[in-house]
């Protein structure tokens, strides 16, 4: 039997949850072939890149204009505050240039140097805000994810997961994770 275990977003990427590795070890000890994926970490790793940040800025420019003021261009029911859009459009290229270094610092002993670690942490927080804005009102944070709508009904959840305008994870999953599951052809997928 082949089992694929997936840990979904959103959990703090700095402290991975131990349930999946524990279950993986238990199953492997009993002779089960297990493929383990931390999709939470993979999503953060994909989003916190220079390319992703540059694409987020381009999407904001396309939707709101270069100055971030023309919300009339957007077809969204809910609009982010124009000042937030303007600020992230202005800071976006700078954040894109810094994100890879910030991610590297957080993964290294340099993170424990107060000012360096704090600055890198702030860059990551700002980058997540930038990455989320094209999916407004959905919002991805280090500690949480705020969906664009109610998550207390199956019908609403199904609408949210299929909506490319508000589901920050959809494109990432379609481009890689779903194809990987199909390629591996596991007997069981555990999420």
Image (spheres, rainbow, N blue to C red):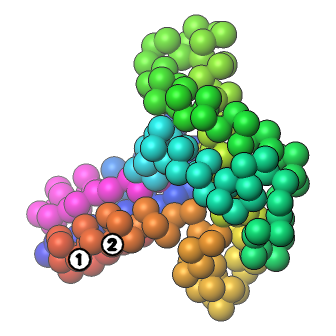
Residue at 66%, 19% in the rendered image:
118
The label number, if any, that marks residue 182 in the structure image? 1
Secondary structure state at the residue bearing disc 1: helix
Residue indicated by mark 2: 178
Q: Check the picture and name the quadrant holding the C terminus.
A: bottom left
Binning the other alpha carbons within 10 Å of mark 1 as few (below 14), some (14 to 19) or many (20 upward) gives: few
Residue placed most toward the observer, 104 or 20: 104
Report whether 119 appears left or right of 76. left
Residue at 72%, 80% in the rendered image:
152
Residue 170 percent coordinates (x, y): 49, 69
Report whether 115 appears left or right of 168. right
Residue 27 percent coordinates (x, y): 23, 62
For the residues labelled 2 and 1, say whether their Cβ atoms are less than 8 Å apart. yes
Residue 50 percent coordinates (x, y): 47, 38
Among the 4 quarters of the image, the one containing residue 69? bottom right
Binning the other alpha carbons within 10 Å of mark 2 as few (below 14), some (14 to 19) or many (20 upward) gives: few
Q: Check the picture and name the quadrant holding the N terminus.
A: bottom left
**Bounds of the magenta span?**
24-40
Secondary structure state at the residue bearing disc 2: helix
């Amino acid at each position: 039997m082949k089992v694929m275990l997936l840990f979904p977003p959103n959990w703090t990427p700095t402290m991975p949850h131990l349930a999946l590795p524990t279950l993986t070890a238990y199953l492997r000890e009993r002779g089960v072939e297990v493929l383990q994926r931390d999709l939470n970490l993979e999503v953060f790793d994909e989003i916190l890149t220079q390319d992703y940040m540059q694409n987020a800025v381009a999407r904001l420019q396309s939707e709101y204009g270069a100055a971030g003021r023309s919300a009339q261009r957007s077809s969204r029911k809910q609009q982010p505050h124009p000042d937030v859009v303007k600020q992230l459009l202005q800071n976006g290229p700078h954040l894109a240039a810094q994100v890879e270094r910030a991610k590297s610092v957080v993964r290294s002993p340099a993170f424990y140097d107060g000012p360096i670690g704090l600055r890198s942490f702030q860059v990551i927080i700002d980058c997540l805000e930038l990455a989320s804005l094209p999916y407004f009102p959905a919002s991805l944070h280090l500690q949480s994810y705020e969906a664009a709508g109610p998550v207390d009904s199956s019908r609403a959840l199904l609408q949210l997961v299929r909506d490319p305008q508000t589901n920050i994870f959809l494109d990432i999953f379609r481009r890689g994770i779903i194809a990987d599951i199909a390629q591996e052809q596991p007997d069981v997928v555990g999420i």
